[in-house]
Amino acid sequence: MEFTEPGTIDDLVEDATAAGYRATSRLVHDWVSKGLLGKPQRRRTGPNGSEKALHSANQRFLFIALLRERVSTPRLSDLASVPLSLWLYGGDEWVSTDQALRAFQTWVGDPRRTKAWARKVAAWVMSDVDDPRLGTRPSRRELLDALAEALYTGYFDRDLIVAKARPLFETADALLPLANPEDPDQPPRTPEALAFHLEMIIAGGQAISAGELEPWELDAIRELENDSEGATPTPEQFASAPTNLFRGIGVWVIMRRFKQPPNRPDGP
């Protein structure tokens, strides 16, 4: 479906029906609050009272795209990746930074969630070194436990993580080809790098969940992440956009602990 004009909430519901989906005004309001949709533009009160606010043509398109995606991906946290990718590659004409901030909070959810979730993310963090040739089975299990505990509690102890990771990095001959099979000259990761990866995840999740990022900061992170110079993103790039942005947020939050970030565009 193509849209050239903005529409009211009633228009969005009718758009959904015309596309073969079921939607209600309550769903639209809920998705606006979660950042899946942007806030509509209010209109002046006319002689016959207030007129319903308008959603842009691009947001009408986004609504249908979200409904289509919801068929196979019903979780709101997963659906939030759609506006985030559009914000990164499409710009403010598609998704405002204010909407992107709300969408990120939906995408992250509770940064600590459950112990099962923490263990799953911990396994991903140590996936590069989860190999029988590295360390011992007990040392790998201890590292996984330490990572999962940090993710679940939100408490980061760098020295502990480095100490738990170090036994896996002592067999350099085995570690080197695991670092990057396509680039054997690339130095292997270090215990400190693994610890930083974990700290980045925790810091980014906490900052987003607590609403600590300002719009100008997110705009700056987008500028750092989007170096495509107008090129059309590949499906893989589009799908990985939220994860890449999240990594950038984590690094930004960590760095501003040690030095003041640049002043906002309109002054300090």
Image (cartoon, rainbow, N blue to C red):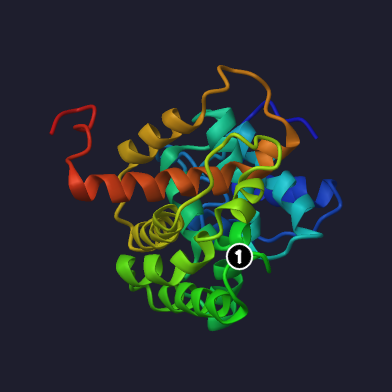
Q: Residue at the location (43% across, 52% down)?
A: 193
The quadrant in which residue 198 appears is bottom left
Residue 209 percent coordinates (x, y):
39, 63
Q: Is residue 161 above or below residue 61?
A: below
Left or right, residue 211 beside residue 205: left
The quadrant in which residue 141 appears is bottom right
Left or right, residue 3 beside residue 135: right
Residue receiving disc 1: 134
Q: Residue furthest right?
A: 20
Residue 126 percent coordinates (x, y):
56, 63
The quadrant in which residue 228 appears is top right
Between residue 212 and residue 196, name the one nearer to us.
Answer: 196
Between residue 65 and residue 202, name the one nearer to us.
Answer: 202
Q: Is residue 222 above or below residue 110?
A: above
Between residue 184 and residue 1, name the one nearer to us.
Answer: 184
Q: Quadrant of the C terminus?
A: top left
Q: Is residue 122 above or below residue 92?
A: below
Amino acid carrying mark 1 in the image: Leu
Residue 192 percent coordinates (x, y):
39, 55
The answer to whether residue 49 of the structure is visible from this angle is no
Q: Residue at the location (60% across, 37% down)?
A: 86
Left or right, residue 230 beside residue 15: left
Q: Residue at the location (50% across, 66% down)?
A: 109
Residue 188 percent coordinates (x, y):
54, 46
The answer to whether residue 153 of the structure is visible from this angle is yes
Dot 1 lies on which element?
A: loop
Q: Quadrant of the N terminus?
A: top right
Q: Residue furthest left?
A: 268
Q: Residue at the location (62% across, 61% down)?
A: 127
